[in-house]
Image (cartoon, rainbow, N blue to C red):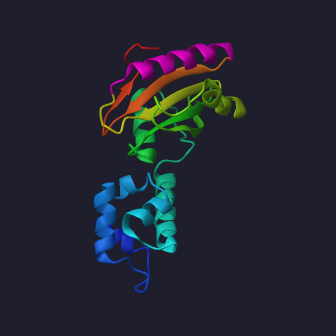
Amino acid sequence: MKDHALLNSLFSAKEKIETYKVKELLDATGGLRGMANLDAQDLINIAGITQVQADRIITALQVGKEVLFPADPQMPMLGSEDMYKWFYGKEGCPPEERLWVIALDVRQHVIGYKLVGKGSIQDVSVSLAMILRYPVQVAAPRIILVHNHPSGDPGPSETDRKLTDKVFEAGKWMSIELVDHIIIGQGKYCSFADKGLL
């Protein structure tokens, strides 16, 4: 079933979204995967759909993501490719730069993850305290940093390298191991661990 048909299958005949609005939504977001990175207000702003329609779309997309990519996968994340595939499936590559902290247990199972920065890592205020607060709260001995480059190029910048070094050093004092920093681009990624940058 095509994306436009899937969207309208969420609604009764009286509630269906006009065809041109569905096209606006899909064109602006690049499809359902891109739409899943937005919130209800974003959908309203893009195509002028109602709050009820936007809420239902976001809820359906969230349910789908949780079924396909559960927050606590049973298999351990043993490498950067495992983590990339799981995380890209959940968050994709949003149109703005975002930074997440993924908390892991000693066997590399995901405890959970949290968004700690939005906008640009260079511009947004992301302190070490913000990054390390979440793993402390959930008693995670290991973490992975993940952030995206909306340009699509996952190559690390000097700012990315400096942030990684700071988190690595601060984590050692708190007995929190930074296992990796993964940068997500469009359909590809860069792992600091794989490149020997940690």
Residue 59, x across and y down, in percent: 52, 63
Residue at 65%, 24% in the rendered image: 141
Residue 162, x across and y down, in percent: 47, 17
**In the displayed structure, would residue 46 be above or below residue 70?**
below
Place residue 18 in its image quadrant.
bottom left
From the viewer's perspective, tell me whether residue 116 is left or right of residue 153.
Answer: right
- Residue 193 in view of the camera: no
**How many labels were placed on the picture?**
0
From the viewer's perspective, tell me whether residue 123 is left or right of residue 105.
Answer: left
Residue at 50%, 54% in the rendered image: 67
Residue at 30%, 39% in the rendered image: 187
Residues 23 and 176: in front is 23
Span highlighted in magenta in the image? 155-174
Residue 175, x across and y down, in percent: 67, 17
Residues 189 and 99: in front is 99
Residue 12, x across and y down, in percent: 44, 82
Place residue 159 in its image quadrant.
top left
Residue at 48%, 48% in the rendered image: 69
Residues 53 and 97: in front is 97
- Residue 56 in view of the camera: yes
Residue positioned most to the front? 123
From the viewer's perspective, tell me whether residue 138 is left or right of residue 156.
Answer: right
**In the displayed structure, would residue 119 be above or below residue 38?**
above
User: Was residue 160 drawn as part of the magenta stretch in this picture?
Assistant: yes
Residue positioned most to the bottom? 14
**In the displayed structure, would residue 179 be above or below residue 35?**
above
User: Was residue 4 drawn as part of the magenta stretch in this picture?
Assistant: no
Quadrant of the image containing the N terminus: bottom left
Q: Main secondary structure of the magenta part?
A: helix
